[in-house]
Amino acid sequence: MNEKLSASEFYRLSHEYSEHAHQLLRDVSTEQQMQQYQTLIYHAIHALICTKEQFQLSAEQDVTVTLELCNLLVQETVEFDLAETYLSSVKERLHATDLLHEKMLVEEALVRVAKMRGSSQHLKDSLRNVNATLSDLDGSNSAWHLYFSFLRIELISMISPSDQRILRLFEELIQSSRDAPPFHLFIMCSYLGYCLDQHLSVPMHYLQELATLSDSEAPPPLKLWKHLIELLVLMQIDSNITGKLSEFKEFVTIHKKVLTSPSFNLRLDNKVEITLNSLVFRYKDFKNIILLFQSISYLTNCYDKKANFSTRFLPKVKKAATELLDSAEDANILAINNMRSFYKRMLDLCHYYTCFEGLILEGVCEEVTDETEYAALINAMKLQLAKNSEGALQAYSKIIDSKFSTEFRLIGMLNCFVIKVATMSKHGGTVAFDDYQKVNEIWASITHLVDSHEFRMNQTWQCTLVVIWIATHFHPFTNAQLSRENDADYLEKLKWFHSANSYCKVASSSSHGSVNNEEKPKAPALKKALLLLFLLNYIAGATVVHDLGEKCQISNACFYLGQQQQMPLMRYLAGLSHLLNCGLAMKSKDVAITRSKLKELVENLLKSGFELAQ
Amino acid sequence: MASFPGDGTNIPKRLVECLEFQPLNHLIPKDGLVKLLRSSLELYPALSEDAFSETLQDHSKAEKKVFTPLGKNGKLNIRFRELNSVQPSPTGPVLNLFDGLSEKAKQFLNTECLSSLKRLHSDDEMSDVDEETSS
C-alpha cells in the first residue's frame, strides 16, 4: 500500500479502473456488483484527483486531466458542484496564459455541466458566459466561434424554446459556417429540426440546398441524419414519402457496412474537432427508426390492406426496441441511462400509435395511463367515442390550456370546437351569446395557429378546416346559427379539394367547372385518410355536386367504404343520403338494399346506446 | 321519404351532431417523432489527447507519491448516479467485477472505500445478466 507512483502511473491506473468498469457495466446485475462498479469508478476518480493534486502538472496536462475528471463526474455521479469547482480552478489557472484552445475546452465543459443541471438559473448564467466567450473570440478566426454560436442557440432554446432570437441566430450561423461544409450541413439540419419541433414552416431554400449537396461532402452518418430530417419534413406536411424511402434504401445499400458506430467526428478546422453521437447513426438502430416513421406516415391508411404499414411494422419495432433496450456496449451510467430512455420513448410511441390505430379501426384501444400529451389526447378521444361529451370537452380543454406543443393543442381545439357546435345544433334555435362568442373565439384561434405554423402547408389540415367549417356553418349539416362572416371562400376550396379527391370516378366538369380556371393550381391528391375523404365527399355530394348520377356514386362509395373503419354514425349519414339519392334516381333495387343495410346498422346503433325517442 | 331507418330514434341525423361522437382521428400528431430524433443527438469536442503522451514530457515525471486512500479521511464523498433499470431479471452467474484487473490496480484497490461514504441511494434494481460474459 505504501508503494509510490508517478503522476503518469496514477493517470494510467485511473484509465484502467474506468475502462475496466465500463466494459462490465452492462453485465452488472446485483447490488453487490453495483458496489464493485462504484468502487472501480471511485478509484478512477480518486486517481485522477491524486494526479492533479499531488503533482506539478503543466497547464495543458492539468486541462486534460481535469476534463477527464469532469467527464467521469458528470457521467457517473451527481457531483456537479465538484466538477464545476475543478473546472473553475483550472480556468483560473489558464487566465494568465494564451492557451486559447484549452480555455475553450474548459469553457465548453462548464456549459455541459450547466446543461446537466438544467435549472433555468444555471442555463442563464451559462448563456451569459457563452456570450462573453463569443465576444472574446470575435476576430480570432477560430472555429470555436462556430461551435459556441451553436451552444448559444442550444442554451437559448433550452431556456425558452420559442425565443425570437433563435431563427436569426441560426440564419447567421448557417452563413458563417460555410467554410466548414460538414458543420454547415449539420447546422442546416439542426435549423430544420428546430422548425419541425416548433411546427414552423421550414425555409424552402435550405431544403433545396440540402437536396443539392453533393455526396462527397459529408460523412455517411451525417448524410443519414440529413435524410431523416428531410423525411420528417415531408411527414409533417403529410406529403408522399415513397420517393424519400427509396432514396433511403439506395443510401443504406451503399453505406450499411460503415454505419456501425453511434458516433463520428467532424473537423471544423485544424484545431477544433467535434464528436456527434446518436443511436440512429447505427444501422441496427436506424432501421427501426425508419420503420417507425414509415408506420406513422401511413397510419391513416391502416384500413387499407395494401398499405397498412402501421399494422405490420409497429409490433416489429416494439419487439426490436425491447431487445435493444439492453444492448449497451462499453458504456458509462449516463450513456446507458440515455440509451434506455431513448428506447423507452420509442416503445411508448409504438404504444400510442397502436392506440390511435385501434381507435380508428375498432373504436377501442388499450389503457393509457401516463401523463404525456399523447395519453391526454388518446383518453380524450376515448371519452368522445364513449359519448361522454362533457368529459371529452374537459379533457380537450385541458390539452388546449396546457403547455403541450401547438400540434396537440390544435387537434384538441378542433375536436372541442366540433363538440361545442354539435351541442348548440342539438338545442337548435337561437344560440346563447356566450356560447356563440366562445365558438367563434376557438375558430379564430384555430385559423390563427394554422396560418402562423407549418399546418398552412399541410393539405390534410387545410382540407380539414374546409370541411369542418362547412359542417358547422351550413344547413343541413348543423342546426346551430353561426355567423358566416369568417367564411374564407370555404365552398370554393371545397370544390377545389373535391376536384382531385372525388369518390366519383368520372366527375362531370360541370360540378367543378368554376375551379378549373387557369389561376388556381391543380388540387393535391390528399393522403388516404378515410374519415377526411368521407367528410369531403359527403359534404361535396350534398353541396357542390349537382349531377344525380355523380351524387349516387359518391353516396354509394361513402356508405360502403365507410365500413372499413369504426365510424357507424358517419356510415348512417351516408346511408341516409344514399337512400335519398337512389330514390330520386328511381333505382328501386338499390333503395331496397340500402334500406335493409341501414336497418341493420340502426339496430347495432341502438344496441350501442342510442334509443327510441320518447 | 315518409319514414326511414332510424327515424324516431335519437341517432343523430345531422353531420355535426354525428361528429360529436367521432374524434377527428385522421389528424395524427407527429410531435413525438421529431422529439425522439432530436433527443438522441449529442455533440461535444472530441477529446483524444493523452495527458502523459511521449511528446508531453514534463518535470513531474520523476516524482513519485503515495496513493493516499481519500475515502478514509472523508475528503471525497461521492453520490453516484442510479442506473435506470429495465426490468427485474433473475440473478445470473456470479460476475466479479474485480477480475481481470492488473496486479497494480488490484494492489491499490481499497474495497472498503465506499463503506465510509454515506450511501444515499442503494436501491439500484439491476437486471439483465449476459450469461456468456460472466466468469
Image (cartoon, rainbow, N blue to C red):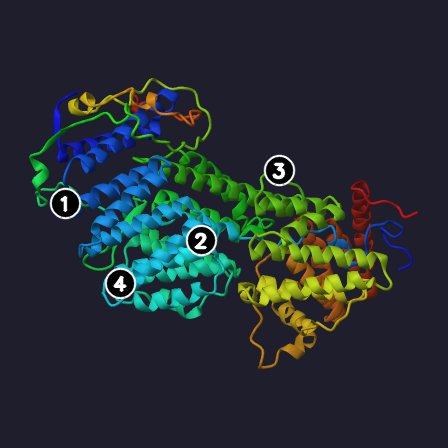
Q: Position of residue A570 (x, y in %)?
A: 73, 54
- Alpha carbon of mark 3 to alpha carbon of mark 2: how far? 34 Å
- Alpha carbon of mark 2 to alpha carbon of mark 1: how far? 36 Å
Q: Are marks 2 and 4 in contact (CB under 8 Å)?
A: no
- Inspect the image, locate mark 4, and give the three-letter code of the amino acid beneath it: Leu
> From this viewpoint, is residue A357 visible?
no
Badges 3 and 2, same chain: yes
Nearest the camera: B57 or B42? B57
Q: Position of residue A252 (x, y in %)?
A: 34, 51
Q: Is residue A283 left or right of residue A293?
A: left
Q: Are marks 1 and 4 in contact (CB under 8 Å)?
A: no
Residue of label 4: A137
- Inspect the image, locate mark 2, and give the three-letter code of the amino acid beneath it: Met
> From this viewpoint, is residue A312 visible?
yes
Q: Are marks 4 and 3 in contact (CB under 8 Å)?
A: no
- Alpha carbon of mark 2 to alpha carbon of mark 4: how far? 23 Å
Residue of label 1: A58
Badges 4 and 3, same chain: yes
Q: Give the image quarter of residue A534.
A: bottom right
* N-terminal-most mark, 1 or 3: 1
